[in-house]
Image: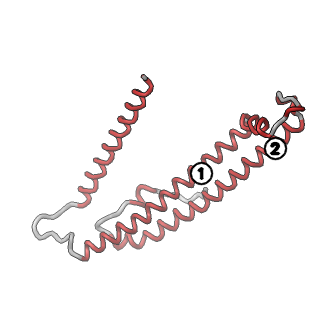
Amino acid sequence: MSEIELDYEADRSIDHNALDIEWVEQANHYGRYAEQLAHAKLAADSAKENLDIVDTDIIAEIRKDPEKHGLDPKKVTETAMKGLAKLDKRHTEAFEKELKAKHDVDVLAGAVKAFDHKKAALENLVKLMAAQYFASPSEPRDLDEEVVRKMKQERRNKDIRKVSTRTRRSKGEMR
């Protein structure tokens, strides 16, 4: 991936008190993450191509000298050669690089989608602002405090889900 510094948590958050600045930055954030996604897709395609080349080389080595790899030269099958290729360290390393590259694509695709959601949130916040939803004739609201409180609750819920998942797994292990 390219060497652009990304701060996903900060970039996707919304400052309710500076919607004009958020709108100005929205396109830049989206563009940076979309560009990184394109680089990640290129890297994933390259990693897939490299894995195919590594496997082809390993299979060629097996085909050239099947006995060296524990196969009967008279009974060499494509399935046997592919199976042996998957056991080769070179295949494992190339496969792990491909998995990492695919993971990067998935993470960045999620980030780009999050910026679509941020855009919709900004649109709705502006509509609320225009409708004077945030006008406070009686009791002022502290949106920052409310957002922090909501985020803390979400973290607690996430922690609870983790514990619940671990508990279910350990129950499954006991059976």
User: Extreme top residue here?
Assistant: 174
How many numbered marks are there? Answer: 2
Q: In front: 94, or 16?
A: 94
Question: Residue 140 has which mark?
Answer: none
Residue identifier under label 1: 102
Residue 67 image offset from top left, x and y in percent = 87, 29
The answer to which quarter of the image holds residue 66 is: top right
Residue identifier under label 2: 57
Residue 161 image offset from top left, x and y in percent = 35, 40
The residue located at (60%, 62%) in the rendering is: 38
Amino acid under disc 1: Lys
The residue located at (86%, 38%) in the rendering is: 63
User: Extreme bottom residue here?
Assistant: 130
> For the N terminus, which image quadrant?
bottom right
From this view, report whether residue 140 is shown above or below residue 100.
below
Amino acid under disc 2: Asp
* Disc 1/disc 2 C-alpha distance (Å): 23 Å
Residue 152 image offset from top left, x and y in percent = 29, 48
Residue 130 image offset from top left, x and y in percent = 25, 77
Q: Of helix, strand and loop, which one carries label 2?
A: helix
- N-terminal of the pair, mark 1 or mark 2, is 2
Q: In front: 118, or 136?
A: 118
From this view, report whether residue 151 is shown above or below residue 92.
below
